[in-house]
Image (spheres, coloured by chain):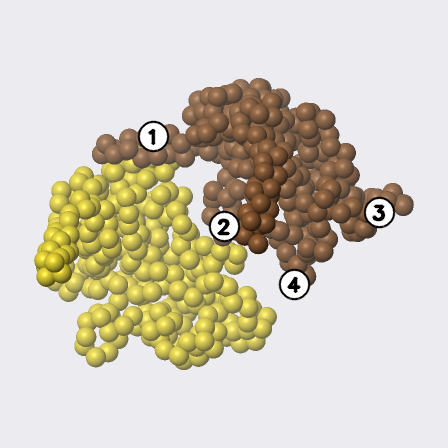
Chain colours: A brown, B yellow
């Protein structure tokens, strides 16, 4: 009996060796961990083509990964909006009473990215090398060092405190009020976590004139849950949109403003069909496992 | 062996008690002095006249005491802590004398402070001076201190005045709650009003300066600029058709005093309103003796 057990364990151990986690390491998937998107012109909120799409991989050990972009101050408010892949309504994060949050979701394709924005002169990172922040050392009147946070991207958390960030796959945005004309600003986009399925995080970035509420109005996304629909199609691979991800997102967004063409399945129907035709434990499910959803409260 | 080990462990444990972490964390105490003029005000009346009120301790708004790198008078037309380029005064610490309290009625939001009233009747009387009527959830004017007390007990599910925390305790141990128990007490020999502050567990830095300001009530509304009454951020009780918010000071009253200081408020002057610390045991007396916007 012992012999059989040991042999079985050895075979199992050898079979385990065919799993390669190389793609989880920097440089293995051909996508840089720190990228620079250059100077981006401040766009019009109504311009659908103003979105810049990019992908980042895992960063080297001890280096903060992510991306940087720069824009020139307009003299008014500028909205910076970033949306990491893929969609936010995953039940793993927010089971609750809202039906729109109770769709199943494949959590392995979600990443998280955080933004800070400030005047470029205060930026501590180096584009394409490391992502920094806007924390500057200041000596007060009696000679003590104090760290000044010059990040102008103020995001409030659930408790009304500043310094908040959106969660996994959720869009993150802020207004930069009173930008100084012709002064260069840097958007520091830090990779919080890359998706577990391929370790490459794709995202969309919008830098537009005016307040983010104007942008949401221009995109008919006034509801907080609609924020996912300001930037669509951000799930990409090698710059190419991943159609199935985009389809799931589009079904969600069509449902929000009741603009779905006749015959279009609802997101629930799509997920149900997917679950019936695909074994999510074996094949890719874009919705996730519908049997693994907590009951809405 | 055990006989040797146990005494050795005992000695080691005793030695550990002598470990000095090198932290200079102390309770810092001091005195705030207000001249009687700071407790007086011309209150506009409905008939167009002004009524001279005070000096009265109830006129003292929340007093904010901060420890700052320095204080100057070049940024504003009144003394103000020195600011970093971001506008932040970068306080090392601070405290308050008089905190916003849950008023138990919608109309009392941001109008009730601790350490200012010796009875609930005084609240009714004081608002009457400002011709500020206030009503209960059924639209009836509140005219009795006992009714305030009763509503507070109902709304907060409390059973004692100590829990409501509007009235002070018997701080001077004379067996009753009187003027001697309030945050500021009249010094009979000088005519000034004095209050003691204590900043708990402050990391001491030689050279920082204590400075304070007082947010005076708006004579028209009896409200304070430093009070945040956003129901999303402060205690909020729904009672029948009333949304009763408690009110609380904004988080950055010490970081950005200039945001809150307006005409009629009082701040520490450059002459008597600043104490620069040399040691943690300094005998500290700072005045709030400069009226913003003149007399």
Q: Where residue A24 appears, x then y in whole percent? A: 56, 32
Q: Secondary structure at mark 1?
A: strand
> Which numbered disc, 3 or 4, marks the residue that appears first in the sequence?
3
> Which numbered disc, 2 or 4, marks the residue that appears first in the sequence?
2
Q: Badge 1: how crowded within 10 Å, few (<14), some, or many (20+)?
A: few
Front residue (pair B164, A59): A59
Is residue A79 visible from the viewing direction of this image?
no
Picture quarter containing residue A253?
Answer: top right
> Which numbered disc, 1 or 4, marks the residue that appears first in the sequence?
1
Is residue A244 visible from the viewing direction of this image?
yes
Q: Where residue A195 appears, x then y in whole percent? A: 61, 37
Q: In the drawing, does residue B112 fall left or right of residue A199?
A: left
Q: Where residue A159 appears, x then y in whole percent? A: 49, 52
Chain to which mark 1 belongs: A
> Which numbered disc, 1 or 2, marks the residue that appears first in the sequence?
1
Q: Are marks 3 and 4 on the same chain?
A: yes
Tell me, for residue A137, which label it has, or none.
1
Front residue (pair B124, A207): A207
User: Which is closer to the viewer, label 2 or label 4?
Assistant: 4
Instruction: Provide the residue designation for mark 2.
Output: A160
Instruction: Give the answer, above or below, for where A90 lies relative to B197.
Output: above
Q: Are marks 1 and 3 in contact (CB under 8 Å)?
A: no
Instruction: Provide the residue designation for mark 3.
Output: A265
Instruction: Provide the residue designation for mark 4.
Output: A297
Q: In the drawing, does residue B295 fall left or right of residue B273?
A: right
Residue at image position (57%, 25%) is A28
Residue at image position (37%, 48%) is B253
């Amino acid at each position: 009996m012992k012999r059989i057990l040991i042999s079985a364990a050895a075979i199992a151990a050898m079979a385990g060796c065919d799993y390669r986690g190389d793609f989880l390491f920097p440089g293995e998937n051909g996508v840089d961990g720190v990228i620079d998107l250059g100077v981006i012109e401040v766009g019009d909120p109504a311009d659908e083509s103003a979105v810049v799409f990019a992908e980042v991989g895992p960063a080297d050990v001890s280096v903060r990964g992510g991306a940087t972009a720069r824009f020139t101050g307009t003299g008014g408010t500028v909205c910076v909006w970033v949306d990491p892949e893929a969609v936010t309504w995953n039940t793993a994060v927010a089971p609750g009473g809202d039906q729109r949050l109770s769709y199943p979701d494949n959590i392995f394709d979600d990443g998280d990215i955080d933004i800070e924005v400030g005047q470029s002169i205060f930026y501590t990172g180096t584009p394409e090398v490391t992502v920094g922040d806007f924390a500057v050392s200041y000596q007060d009147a009696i000679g003590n060092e104090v760290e000044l946070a010059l990040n102008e991207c103020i995001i409030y958390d659930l408790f009304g405190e500043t310094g908040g960030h959106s969660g996994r796959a959720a869009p993150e945005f802020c207004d930069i009020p009173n930008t100084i004309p012709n002064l260069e600003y840097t958007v520091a986009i830090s990779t919080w976590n890359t998706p577990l399925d391929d370790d490459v995080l794709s995202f969309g970035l919008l830098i537009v004139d005016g307040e983010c509420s104007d942008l949401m109005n221009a995109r008919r996304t006034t509801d907080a849950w609609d924020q996912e629909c300001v930037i669509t199609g951000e799930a990409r691979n090698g710059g190419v949109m991943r159609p199935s991800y985009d389809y799931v997102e589009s079904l969600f967004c069509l449902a929000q403003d009741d603009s779905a063409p006749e015959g279009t399945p609802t997101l629930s129907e799509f997920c149900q069909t997917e679950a019936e035709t695909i074994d999510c434990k074996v094949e890719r499910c874009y919705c996730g496992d519908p049997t693994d959803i907590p009951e809405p409260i | 062996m055990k006989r040797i080990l146990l005494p050795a462990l005992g000695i080691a444990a005793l030695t550990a008690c002598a470990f000095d972490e090198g932290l200079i964390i102390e309770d810092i105490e001091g005195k705030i002095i207000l001249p009687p003029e700071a407790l007086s005000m011309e209150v506009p009346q409905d008939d167009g006249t002004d009524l001279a009120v005070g000096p009265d301790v109830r006129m003292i708004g929340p007093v904010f005491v901060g420890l700052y790198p320095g204080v100057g008078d070049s940024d504003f037309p009144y003394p103000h802590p020195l600011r970093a380029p971001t506008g932040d005064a970068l306080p090392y610490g601070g405290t308050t004398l008089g905190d916003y309290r849950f008023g138990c009625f919608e109309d009392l939001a941001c109008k009730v402070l601790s350490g200012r009233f010796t009875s609930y009747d005084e609240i009714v009387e004081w608002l009457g001076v400002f011709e500020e009527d206030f009503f209960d959830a059924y639209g009836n004017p509140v005219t009795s201190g006992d009714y305030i007390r009763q509503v507070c007990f109902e709304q907060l599910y409390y059973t004692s005045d100590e829990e409501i925390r509007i009235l002070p305790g018997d701080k001077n141990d004379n067996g009753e709650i009187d003027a001697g128990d309030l945050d500021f007490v009249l010094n009979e020999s000088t005519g000034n009003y004095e209050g003691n502050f204590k900043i708990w567990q402050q990391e001491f830095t030689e050279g920082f300066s204590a400075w304070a300001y007082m947010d005076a009530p708006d004579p028209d509304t009896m409200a304070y600029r430093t009070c945040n009454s956003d129901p999303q951020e402060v205690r909020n009780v729904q009672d029948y058709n009333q949304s009763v918010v408690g009110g609380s000071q904004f988080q950055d009253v010490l970081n950005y005093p200039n945001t809150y200081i307006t005409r009629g408020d009082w701040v520490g002057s450059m002459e008597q309103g600043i104490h620069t610390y040399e040691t943690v045991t300094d005998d500290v007396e700072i005045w709030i003796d400069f009226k913003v916007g003149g007399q």
